[in-house]
């Protein structure tokens, strides 16, 4: 790691040791617009102060902001000024800001700090936030940070890092309240009041048996309203959703959405309670997974504007090379009909319409199907019905588009046969688009391949190839060319 100067200045100002007040002052009205985003002129003022190395002015501007807005500010300033901004705001650079930072921006700042400072930050964060911060470091840096942690914190973070990435084990927090089922409501209230080391924020208490397996939950509202002598066993809710520690975070998010959960217990392979996941973590996961699927459909990589340029280029170039290969395949189909195009050049003008419309139709179907797979709306029970539905939609759209383009071509070129050929080709390619748009992602999903990653390449290849082949083939068969 590097950045000793930054470390010294941050440590002198107490930037990492201070627990910032959760209720930060409200941002000045001139810093945020009506959509609660930082105004461009405010960001420019901060950057001008950074250029002038006026740390006091930077601190004065940033101080009224909420930690989440300070995190946004780090994304908006130039990359080479982020470390200077961290030095300038000193004690405002609290753990709340670290937790809210974009992954790439946080990695940049964390890598600039020595291991003991990173460990000091991690000890102030919840376990899930600390894991999210440390897991992005290199293996060597991870070990250096872990060595600086207290034994208890180190054990918790090492245990979380032992679980697969994007699993419930990485996502869960180990800060929760669990009590035995033998307690009464009064015993629980006294326990919550007397133990200061309990989490500062929680919504329900987990009730466990002698083996520390969750048997129910008790909401704080119930605890406050029930008589003290009532056993927890009689008032707890036995209807709970348990999350296996190795469950994928996308499936966790779906369960929260389906059952309207606020929090859920995480259990190990023996069914013992080892952590909890709360809805605030799930909001980030839902956004992350939705964005990930959309960007993968286009082959744009992570799509984060803070991602290093070389990583973005590598991710995009890979899929652009694949698309180049599929484009060559489609052009080879056109080459088969080179003689027909030479004899009737108007075919070259019209054939991109057929392939282009097919590609758009295929993309529409693909987007719907990938979303249905991701949200568990499309299962083995309704796959056939979904295929028939998309074929009916494709037939209807193809017929409507075929009549439009066929009629327009007939009127424009006074050639009814040409109009009939392009209309029929439009119907055929729309059917291919609808069929490919559902069969490709469903097939990939059956083989445990993420359909959001590679479906678009196969679908566009099918629609381009069949678009050219159907239009040019019909033109030759009918004697048009």
Image (spheres, rainbow, N blue to C red):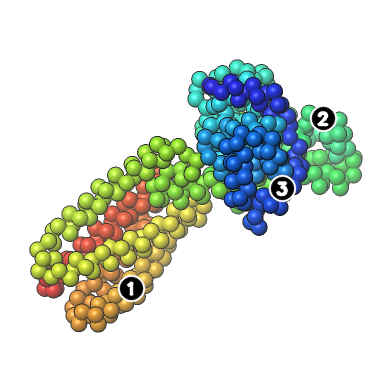
Q: Is residue 17 visible?
A: no
Q: Position of residue 396 (x, y in %)?
A: 37, 72
* Mark 1 surroundings within 10 Å by alpha-carbon count, few (fewer than 14), some (14 through 19), many (20 or more): some
Q: Does label 3 or label 2 sit earlier along the sequence?
A: 3
Where residue 207 is drawn, which disc sits there?
Answer: none
Nearer mark to the viewer, of 1 and 3: 3
Q: Position of residue 243 (x, y in %)?
A: 61, 39
On the question of residue 303 being in view, the answer is: yes
Label number found at residue 196: 2
| Label 3 Cα crowd, 10 Å radius (few <14 / some 14-19 / many 20+) | some
Q: Rounded to the nearest whole Å, what is the CA distance between mark 1 and mark 3?
A: 53 Å
- Residue 401's mark? 1
| In the foreground, 178 or 83 | 83
Distance between mark 3 and mark 2 Cα atoms? 32 Å
Instruction: Name the quadrant containing residue 301.
Output: top left
Q: Are marks 1 and 2 in contact (CB under 8 Å)?
A: no
Q: Is residue 149 left or right of residue 475?
A: right
N-term mark: 1 or 2: 2
Residue that mark 3 sits on = 27
């Amino acid at each position: 790691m590097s950045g000793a100067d930054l470390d010294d200045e941050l440590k002198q100002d107490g930037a990492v040791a201070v627990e910032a007040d959760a209720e930060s002052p409200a941002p000045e009205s001139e810093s945020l617009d009506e959509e609660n985003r930082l105004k461009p002129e405010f960001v420019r003022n901060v950057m001008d102060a950074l250029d002038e190395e006026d740390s006091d002015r930077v601190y004065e501007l940033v101080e009224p902001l909420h930690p989440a807005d300070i995190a946004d500010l780090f994304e908006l300033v130039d990359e080479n000024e982020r470390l200077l901004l961290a030095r300038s705001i000193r004690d405002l650079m609290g753990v709340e800001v670290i937790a809210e930072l974009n992954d790439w921006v946080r990695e940049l700042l964390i890598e600039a700090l020595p291991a003991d400072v990173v460990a000091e930050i991690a000890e102030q964060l919840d376990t899930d936030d600390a894991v999210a911060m440390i897991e992005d470091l290199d293996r060597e840096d991870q070990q250096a940070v872990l060595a600086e942690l207290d034994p208890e914190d180190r054990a918790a973070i090492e245990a979380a890092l032992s679980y697969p990435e994007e699993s419930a084990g990485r996502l869960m927090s180990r800060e929760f309240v669990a009590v035995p089922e033998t307690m009464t409501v009064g015993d629980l209230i006294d326990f919550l009041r007397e133990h200061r080391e309990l989490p500062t924020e929680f919504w329900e208490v987990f009730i466990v048996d002698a083996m520390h397996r969750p048997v129910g939950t008790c909401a704080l509202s119930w605890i406050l309203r029930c008589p003290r002598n009532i056993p927890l066993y009689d008032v707890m809710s036995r209807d709970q959703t348990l999350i296996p520690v190795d469950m994928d975070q996308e499936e966790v998010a779906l369960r929260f959405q389906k059952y309207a959960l606020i929090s859920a217990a995480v259990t190990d392979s023996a069914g013992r309670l080892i952590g909890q996941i709360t809805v605030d973590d799930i909001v980030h996961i839902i956004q992350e997974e939705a964005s990930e699927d959309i960007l993968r459909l286009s082959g744009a990589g992570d799509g984060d504007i803070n991602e290093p340029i070389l990583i973005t280029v590598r991710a995009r170039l890979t899929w652009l090379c694949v698309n180049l290969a599929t484009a060559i395949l489609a052009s080879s189909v056109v080459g088969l009909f080179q003689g027909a195009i030479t004899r009737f050049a108007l075919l070259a003008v019209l054939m991109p319409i057929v392939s282009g419309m097919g590609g758009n139709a295929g993309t529409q179907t693909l987007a719907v199907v990938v979303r249905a797979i991701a949200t568990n709306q499309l299962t083995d029970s309704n796959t056939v019905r979904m295929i028939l539905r998309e074929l009916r939609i494709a037939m209807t759209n193809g017929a409507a588009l075929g009549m439009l383009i066929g009629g327009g071509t007939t009127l424009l070129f006074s050639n009814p046969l040409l109009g009939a050929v392009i209309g029929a080709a439009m119907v055929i390619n729309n059917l291919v688009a609808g069929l490919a748009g559902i069969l490709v992602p469903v097939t990939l999903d059956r083989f445990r391949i993420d359909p959001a990653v590679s479906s678009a390449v196969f679908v566009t290849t099918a629609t381009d190839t069949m678009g050219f082949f159907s239009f040019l083939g019909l033109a030759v068969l009918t004697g048009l060319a």
